[in-house]
Image (tube, rainbow, N blue to C red):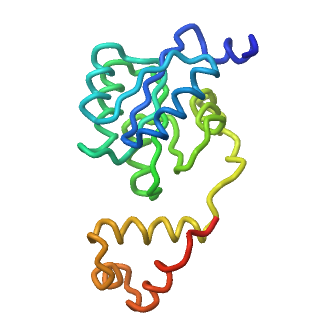
Amino acid sequence: MTEDALQEIGPDKSLLLVDDDEPFLRRLAKAMEKRGFDVETADSVAGGSAIATARPPAYAVVDLRLEDGNGLDVVEVLREKRPDSRVVVLTGYGAIATAVAAVKIGATDYLSKPADAADIMNALLSGDDEMPPPPENPMSADRVRWEHIQRIYELCDRNVSETARRLNMHRRTLQRILAKRSPR
């Protein structure tokens, strides 16, 4: 860890990570600790809100969709308790409407999963006037489409006919897409 990186973080290195994907949460926590942050983790809206209330961190990375609710609720608690905290919202289901909502309630940035630790760190430490650099390996358009289809399929309890109806596509077309491996 270089001295420059530590200075960029600032004197308060507290970081809250809120995500219900346990392996991702552990990997990200370890990576951010190596980069100089003092990490606390939570796997739910309730846990994240409790930590944000008791010990409001200088930085936070919050997943948008959690098992017990919406990650934006944690962002609101953070904004209330510590208005100067820098918050990045993560989601596997990127959409313009949720990005706008996240930024309106005070998120510093919004990243789609899978985001790596370097992208997250750039977003957390970028100045208010500067845009963070684009991700090194953004998802392809085919991958974004596939992720969206998979999300709707899961929300429809894996019912192909209902998913096809909601996506306004032919059922057989959807079956062919679902049978293929995910694009890179």
Residue at position x 43%, y 85% in the image: 175
Q: Position of residue 46 (x, y in %)?
A: 24, 31
> 68 or 24, which is in the foreground?
24
Residue at position x 28%, y 28% in the image: 47
Residue at position x 26%, y 69% in the image: 157
Left or right side of 80 for 178: right
Left or right side of 8 for 153: left
Quarter-of-image position of residue 167: bottom left
Left or right side of 107 for 134: right
Image height of 85 relative to 19, above or below: above
> 8 or 40, which is in the foreground?
40
Q: Position of residue 61 (x, y in %)?
A: 46, 33
Q: Position of residue 123 (x, y in %)?
A: 59, 35
Which image quarter is the C terminus in? bottom right
Residue at position x 44%, y 30% in the image: 17
Image height of 141 relative to 111, above or below: below
Image height of 121 relative to 58, above or below: below
Which image quarter is the N terminus in? top right
> 116 or 70, which is in the foreground?
116
